[in-house]
Every structure is written in structure tokens, then in C-alpha cells.
Amino acid sequence: MIRLMLRFFSILFAVCYLQAGYAQQFGGNPPSIRWEQVNTPAAKVIFPAGLDSAAIRVANIVQHMNSVIQPSIGFKQRQISIVLQNQTTVSNAYVGLAPFRSEFYLTPEQNNFDIGSLPWPEQLAIHEFRHVQQYNNFNTGGSRVLKVLFGESGQALGNALSVPNWFFEGDAVFNETLVSEQGRGRLPYFFNSFRALWDADKDYSWMKLRNGSYVDYIPDWYPLGYMEVAYGRQRYGKYFWKNVTHDAAGYNSLFYPFQHAIKRYSGLSFPQFRDSALTYFKNEFAQLPDSAAPQNKSAKRNQHFIANEQFPAFVDDGTIIYLRSDYKHRTAFILKQGDKETRIRVQDLTLDGYFSYHNGYIVYAGYRADERWNYRDYSELKLLDVKTGTEKRLTSRSKYFSPSFSADGKSIVAVEEAPSGKSELHILDATTGKLMAKIPNPEGVFYTYPKFYGEDKIVSAVRAADGRITVALVDRSTGSITNLLEPSFAPVGFPTLRGDTLYFSRTRKLNDDLYALDLRNRHLYHLTNDSLAGGIGNYQVAVSDHKLAWVSFTAFGYKLHQADQNNIKWEEEKAEALPGLTDVGVTVLKKDSASDLLDKVNFSNLPVKKYPKFYHPFNFHSLIPDFEDPNYSVALQGQNVLNTLQSQIGFNYNRDEGYKEISADAIYGALFPYISAGANYTLDRRGIYKGNNVYWNETAVHAGLEVPLNFISGLHNTGLAIGSDIYYNSTSFQQPFRSTFRDRSYAYLNNYINFTNRIAQPLQNIYPRFGQSVSLNFKQAVVNSSDAQFLANGTFYFPGLFINHNLVINLAHQQKTQNSVISYSNNFPFSRGYTVENFNQMNKIGVNYHFPIAYPDAGISNLVYLHRLRSNVYFDYTHVNDYYTNNTPFKANFRTVGAELWFDTQWFNQEPITFGLRYVHLLDPDTFGGLSPNRVELVVPLTLF
């Protein structure tokens, strides 16, 4: 039991450590990038040369905002390093421990309703720096004890188990809403998910809301957290959450510290508090007309998630193309004619499902990774023939988004989001992808979802430098902009044209509604009918000769609607009188000293200096324990801020032999090949000679090169790593064994190739329906020996009999030199259940059939939640050849049949852990173990694919 508890403790550390670095890319930037920095007491902003403006803005915002918002979370301050990444097309950011650092991915996303329209570096600054303050001030009490013992990973574990992730993100969203005139707390799109659940009378348990589901749509913890945090600030004041989180992170109550702190400072039990917060916001949205109208009348009350139906495009009045995704199948383009649906093709990997259709062709932006540098990736235009399903790549290594055809289908307009931060409209040939024109952008606006209008205009939603957004006409020759609506912080997006009429979505107080604008006379109309009036957000409008199509959000996914244009009501409105954003009942947003703080920041010209690439190279941050019997180890982990050098100093004790091992390892990833090196010294290795124990010490050093390659594009996620290491090992026998045994040394090469390939894996798929994982390893002695060992191991994934079933085949072969002097490590995947020996020749075939059993969606006391129960029935066959000491051949079979029961769980409402029980039945004798042919094992893997 003690060993099991130690292993569970190790897994929690590993999970928290992996999550702390989930977004980091080791050695992800090419060495040609020259790094600079802006230094302030609160943050050191590190950035590629040329991004001075963005870096200075981020540093000024952090510096100005820091002291003003500290009172609501705490006054502890430790400088954070913020790294600005401009090579990636991903829109994201994070703050993490182990090590304490932050990264901003500077490419904004196109959807104006999701995050809003504030300049992206500013949006990231006002959200992410709140996380910095959280970590600085949650280093207290019990969490601080863990940090003293285990470093930053200790604090990460302490914080994760005491303060829920919904608070971290809800508090940061509240901050972005407080200090700006926008923020997600004012965006209806942000609340659509919960509105859909309320609309469908989905009264899910708290644990289900917290942990998600494989069968039902569950919102993430961002809107949940905002509603809880905003309610606490609204009802209990500015310092409520500071008191709660300091008590919780300090473990003033050992069990359920956060819940006890809520009760202490609110007077309500935690269930009363959380339900009151959700009810408060539910009542705010109940003010909308027809808000209780069911959005999916065909769905039964107990209906699970159906599918997302998005981006409709008319072929004609009776035929429509849209994008469909669900929990079982890969995202695909669907052709719908009446009630008949035909799948055109699976969509390539992409960051944004948006596409444009014209006359039998679809164009969209697909994702491609750089082959070597993980922070560099691309968004390339793809052209799909609807009739044949064939596809070709129009652009290469580009960064294009939201492409749209011209009226004649010969040209495409797309948004280029360059590493410099500039947004430009490019016009390309629709057949070849050749760049035909770049439209000037003299006002420095950010474009989203552009459309051709006539011969000389582009219509687009545009975000101004102050964060206000509108739809505008853009002159193709000069880039001059004519606003069609008064710019405001109310999001506008998804424009589409039909003749001289512009259709689009715009935020209207508590909902996102459809509008139409006559471009000839500038008359504006609010579009309504029974479906639109009850829609939870109305987006992505498409228009044919006689019909209108759009999507709205439901508890069962985005739902595609169609209506005759004659049934749509056009209510004229004054453009200058359009309603703006609301605070959704959170009045304290306008009553705080930090309210609208972003508008008050003085952007001073802070000094810029060079940032040395080798600054603080080791940066040791955590002491990681790992207790997996018989090995008990601790490792001091290090990583520099640019994540180009990872280092480790470790100690391991082996309980079986009693030996002690001290090691040091490092890997440098800033060059094309990774460069690694390390050394370890082992005391008291033990063996048996003539019935007596023999002891010796070992010294080992190694160095190596590895080239990691990614080929992620199209339908496949493919990786290839090729490397070679040289190992030198020296053995020194202890007294009194030196007179009997001679010290020896040897060196060998460890050469390897690792290949993985898989297609996209929908939520319910246990494994990819098609995938391969193959490793080849060849060890060859080069000094004082000629011993060699070759291992080939491959796992192949195939579809099973049903959609979420997998047939998994494992094939392996290992061959080594007879009568080897060197005892190479044995990584052969031997038949399960047997006592393993390292034979001269081993061959294996393993057949596995994985299938789901149930989706319980049930938990116990906010401790453990069971998502899925699944099983695997298997057969392993291993055949070995070897020789006894007298050169007598030895051959044997090791066959196993059995079954595994796997539990996909979530612990403490946020830490995912999978474990299993394995039943093993041996069909052949366990020659080297002699144990029972039937046994049950506990299996706790950290990774599966």
C-alpha cells in the first residue's frame, strides 16, 4: 500500500509538471532569431528583434496595471519573464511554473466574437499577467512548504490541489473585463455554452460541469470561472477572493481547502455559493425575449451531443455545403441536398474551420508545421474540388486566413498575418495561388473575413488600433477605409455579400444577432423571425436566391438553420443608435479603481537591450520525485527561459540490488540537431558469483545528436526522430573482488530511428483509427568489444468493428550477439505476465482489441470522476532462441491471453489520470519466474500513444 501511495504521489507530480509546461516547445526557434528585452520590476519582456513596439506596449501595460490590481489578489511580487513568439500561427498564451515564465503567441484569431477585438498583445497582457499575480501570491502556507521541498513543481502541485483551475481562468477573465472596455465578461459569445445548457434544461451535476464528458457537451472552465468569480466580487467585495485563495493555497483547512474558505468568507456552503452564482447569471439572460425557446426541437430531453454544423454555403436553393464535426468522426465537408447528406471529404488539419465556396470549389486555410522548428508553422490555402473530392495546395509556407472567392471565382482574397504583427489583404490567383496584389494598410487595422465587392472594393470586418471594431469598405488600390458602422467595442463578424447587401453578425446587448446593410443607401436592418429571435447567438449567415441559412448554438452542438427569405423580418435601425456591450449584471466592473485602466496607460518609450541567449542557462526550478518500485529517485530539473537547454541532476536508489546512482544530463536544442551529454556514477552494483555476492562500481558518460522532424499537415500528424549516442562505461570492482575480477571498460554506439504517424482523433476514439508508431534501435560496441543488439518495435492502429473500436497490432524483433559481454538495456515488449529475460533472439506479435464499455460521467466527493470505462482483450506470442552455456540451443514460446479494464478518470476535478487492471493467463510455463499462470496486475501508464 505504501508503494502504491508513493507511485500515485509520483504520478500527481508528473501530471502537474507536464501541465505546467504543456505549451512549451523545446528548441522551437531557429538560431537566426536575435532576442531583445524590455526590463521592468514586474516583468522582463523578451522578444525577437523588430517587435519593439509590441514588447514596449506589453511592458507598459504590465507596469501600469500591476500595483493597481494587486489589492484584490495580494502584494507579493516576483519578476516574470514573458517571451513573445511571432513565428507561430497559433493564437494562445500561458503562464506556468516549473519554470516560472510566460509565452505570448502573437497571431490573433479571426473570430471577433470569441476573444474580442482588443489589440492582441494588449489582450494577452491584461489576461496573462493576472496569472502571474496569482502564482506569486499562492506561494503561501502549505503550498509554500511544497515549494521549499520540491521547488516550483511543488508549488504547482500545491496550487493545483487547493485552487481550482476555474478560479485561475475566471479571475483572469474578470481582470481583462475590469481593466478594459471589452473583455470576455461582456461578450455574449462567451456565455453561449451555459445559455444553451439552461435553454435545454440540462441540469448537470457540479462534477460533470467541472470534468467534462465524452458524450455530452460541457462548457470549459473559463465561463464557469468567470461567473463564479464575478458573483463573488459583486456580492462580497473586492477582497473576497484574495482571502479565499490565500486560505486555500495555504491549506488552512487540510481537506477541501477551497470549499472551506468559501464558507468562511461568504457564510454559504460551497454548493450554495456556486449554485447562487450560476442562478444569478441565468436570471440575467432570462431577460432576453424567447430565451427559453428550445433550439433543437428534434432532440429528446436526454439527447447527448449530436454534432457541430458550421459555415454553411449555398450551392443553390436546395443544396447546401457545411462543415460537420462530432465526437466520433473527423471533421468533414458535407453536401446536403434536401434530406440527403453526402460526405465530400475530411477537412485537413486546420486552426479555423472557416471556408469559402464558389462554383464547385472550396477554399480554406490548412495547418502545416515547420519540419524542424516547433514555434514556426504555417497556414496554407487548400483548394478542394467538391465533385471529385480531390484537393491541392495553393500556397506554401504562407500565413493566410479567411480566404474568399471573387464573384467570378478567378481570384481569392485572404488575410495575411505576418510575423511582424502586420495584417494585410492579399489577392491571389484561384487556380495557381500566385500572389496578384497586396492591398496597402495605411491605418494599421486588423482584417477579418474579407469579401470582394465589385471591381475595386473589399468589404471586411476591421479592428482599429484602439480595439474598436466595425465593417468597412477597403479600396483595393489605396487601402483607404470607409467605415460602414460606427466603430465600437461590440464585436462584428462573419460578413457575407449578396449583390449590394451585406449580411453580418453583431453583438446586441446580451446576444449576437444577424444584420443586413444595403450598401447603396446605407440602410441597416436587424433580421428576425421565430428561429432567429430564440437563437443563442446567430452566426455565419449564407444567402441564396430565396433562402437564408445560419447557425446558432445549442446544448447539442452548433445547429444549422434554413429559412425562406420571405419569412425573415427586416427591422430598420439607425446605425448610430446600435446598442453596445453590457456588463451582464456585474455592476462592480465600473466601480473599481482599476475600471477601464487600459485606456489610461501612458505608453512611455522604455529602453530596449539585447537578451543573451545563454542567460541563466541551467535555471534549476524543481526537485521531482519518482517512486516506481524498485527504483526510488529524485531529480533536480533545470530549463532556461528560451527553452533551449534542459538539464537534470539526479539520484536513484534501487531497492532490489541496493545500488546508488548519481547522474547529470543536459540537452541543447537551439541548433538543427539536439546535442545531449551526461554522466552517471553507480555505487554498489551487485551480482552473484559461486553463490556469493560480488560488488562493483560503474562510471558511464554519454553524448549524442538527434534530429527531430515534424511533418504535420494535410490529414496526418507525422514525426520522425533520427539520432545517435555514444556511451562509455567503466567497471571497477570493489575490494576484495579485484583479485578475482578484472576491471573493464567499453564503448558503444546507440543509433535509433523513431517514427510516428496518425490521423486526427475525435474525442471518443480510444486511439486513432489509422496510425503507426515504429522504433528501430541498433547498439554496436566500438571499444573493447564487438557486441551488438538490434531492436525493431512497431505498433499499428486500425479501425475495429465499430466506430470507437481499435484493432492494435504490435510486432517486435530483437537480436543480439551470442555470449555478449555487454549487458545492453532490454526494451523488448515481452509477452505480458512473464518474468522477462534478455535472450539472444526474440520475436513477438501482440494482438489487441480495444473497445469502450460505458461512459458513467459520475464521481465521488469531488475527488475522482470516471469519464469512461473501456476494455482491451489481447493475445501475446513471443518466441525466443538462445543458447545454454554449453552452446545447447534453447527455444521457447511465451503466449498470453487476457483482458484489461481501463479507467479514464479525472482527480480533484482537474487532473487526468488513466489506470487499469490487467488479467493475465499464461498459456506456457513461466520458466524464469515460476509464478501462477493466472494473475491480476495494476497498470498505471503516463502516456498511451
Image (cartoon, rainbow, N blue to C red):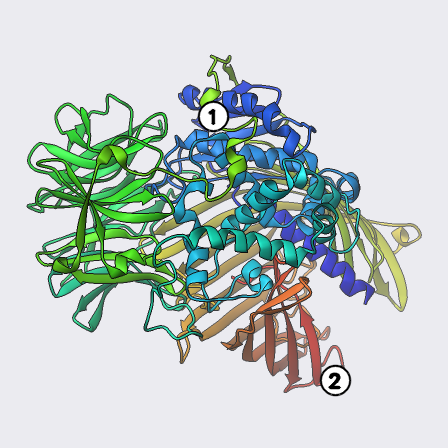
Q: Residue at x 69, y 28 (%)?
A: 75
The numbered dot on residue 446 is: none
Residue at image coords 50%, 13%: 606
Q: Between residues 888 and 288, which one lies in front from this camera angle?
A: 288
User: Residue 95 appears at what percent x and percent y?
Assistant: 57, 38
Q: Position of residue 304 (x, y in %)?
A: 43, 71
Q: CA distance from mark 1 to mark 2?
A: 70 Å
Q: Badge 2 local density, few (<14 within 10 Å), some, or many (20+)?
A: few
Q: Going by the image, does 74 lie left or right of 352?
A: right
What secondary structure is marked by label 1?
helix
Q: Which residue is mark 1?
A: 598
Q: Which residue in the structure is indicated by mark 2?
A: 932
Residue 908 makes an appearance in the image:
no
Three-letter amino acid code at the position of disc 1: Leu
Q: Nearer the viewer, residue 766 or 884?
A: 766
Q: SS at mark 2?
A: loop
Residue 882 spot, x, y in % from top left: 64, 74
Residue 640, percent from left and from top: 60, 32
